[in-house]
Image (cartoon, grey):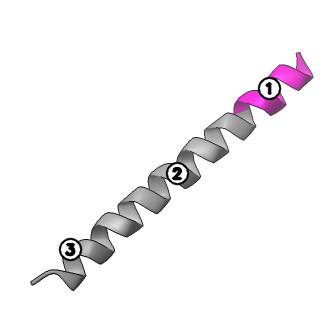
């Protein structure tokens, strides 16, 4: 039970970091391209 919660939290953190990286990359590209 506890291990499953930790695993779900880890996957959620990994997905959140991936989305954050994609959003930051998109904003950077939008700012760099006129």
Query: Residue 10: x, y in percent?
Result: 73, 39
Picture layout, residue 23 above or below residue 12 = below
What whole-number distance in Å separates the C-alpha atoms at marks 1 and 3?
37 Å
Q: Are marks 2 and 1 in contact (CB under 8 Å)?
A: no
Horizontal arrangement in the rendering, residue 31 relative to residue 24 (left or right): left
Q: Measure how far apart labels 2 and 1 are at the Cα level.
A: 20 Å
| Residue visible at 65% across and 45% down in the picture | 13
Q: Where is residue 25 in the image (x, y as percent from the top left)?
A: 37, 67
The part of the image, by quadrant, that contains residue 3 is top right
Write the residue at 37% across / 60% down. 23
Residue 2 sits inside the magenta stretch = yes
SS at mark 1?
A: helix
Compare residues 32 and 20 and report the one nearer the observer: 32
Mark with earlier residue (1, 3): 1
Please, which residue is most extreme toward the top here?
A: 1
Element class at badge 2: helix
Residue that mark 1 sits on: 5
Residue on which disc 3 sits: 30
**Quadrant hosting residue 6:** top right
Question: In the shown orientation, is residue 32 left or right of residue 17?
Answer: left
Assess disc 2: are there few (<14), some (14-19) or many (≥20) residues with their C-alpha within 10 Å of its C-alpha.
few
Instruction: Identify the magenta region.
Output: 1-8
Mark 1 crowdedness (10 Å alpha carbons): few <14, some 14-19, many ≥20: few
Check the picture and name the quadrant holding the C terminus.
bottom left
Magenta: main secondary structure: helix
Check disc 2 and report the residue beneath it.
Answer: 18
- Asked whether 34 or 4 is in front, the reply is 34
Give me the residue at 29% from left, 71% from top.
Answer: 27
């Amino acid at each position: 039970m506890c291990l499953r919660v930790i695993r779900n939290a880890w996957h959620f953190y990994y997905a959140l970091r991936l989305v954050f990286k994609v959003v930051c990359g998109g904003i950077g590209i939008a700012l760099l391209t006129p």
